[in-house]
Amino acid sequence: MRIYNIHETKTPLSKLIEQVLAGEEVVIGKAGRPVAKLVAYEPVINKRTPGRLAGQIHITDDFDKLPDNLKGFF
């Protein structure tokens, strides 16, 4: 792992991205201290499925009931 100064990454960004795609770890630093890490993008594969949690969640009858002391404000 090599730490690249922010100034060093301005021009060769495409080269650094190629390093990331090759599996290398690229860390960007400021004043010699790590502040960011370039990682390869991994798309989210798990799509939301309607009804997947059906029957697993129970909402009580009074879940969204407005308290009597607040009814006068509306």
Image: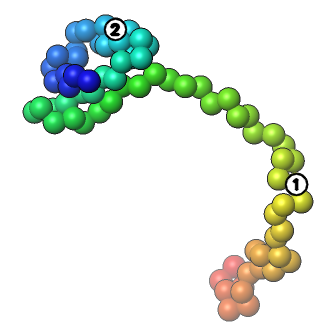
Residue at 50%, 23% in the rendered image: 41
Residue 22 in the image: x percent, y percent? 41, 11
Mark 2 crowd level (few <14, some 14–19, many ≥20, 10 Å Cα): few
Quarter-wise, where is residue 30 in the image? top left
Residue at 43%, 13% in the rendered image: 21
Identified by mark 1, the residue type is Ala
Write down the residue under mark 2. Answer: 14
Left or right of 34? Residue 41 is: right
Left or right of 66? Residue 7 is: left
Q: Nearer the viewer, residue 73 or 64?
A: 64
Can residue 17 be seen here? no
Q: How is the image coloured?
A: rainbow
Q: Residue furthest bottom?
A: 69
Residue 70 in the image: x percent, y percent? 67, 86
Left or right of 43? Residue 56 is: right
The CA distance from mark 1 to mark 2 is 46 Å
Write down the residue under mark 1. Answer: 54
When the figure is inspected, residue 57 is found, relative to residue 31, above or below; the finding is below
Left or right of 35? Residue 21 is: right
When the figure is inspected, residue 35 is found, relative to residue 25, above or below; the finding is below
Under tag 1, what secondary structure? loop
Q: Nearer the viewer, residue 44 or 65?
A: 44
When the figure is inspected, residue 61 is found, relative to residue 43, above or below; the finding is below
Can residue 38 be seen here? yes
The tag earlier along the polypeptide, 1 or 2, is 2
Identified by mark 2, the residue type is Ser
Kindly indicate whether the residue at mark 2 contacts the one at mark 1 (C-beta within 8 angstroms).
no
Quarter-wise, where is residue 58 in the image? bottom right
Residue at 20%, 25% in the rendered image: 3
Residue 53 in the image: x percent, y percent? 82, 53
Residue 36 in the image: x percent, y percent? 29, 33
Mark 1 crowd level (few <14, some 14–19, many ≥20, 10 Å Cα): few
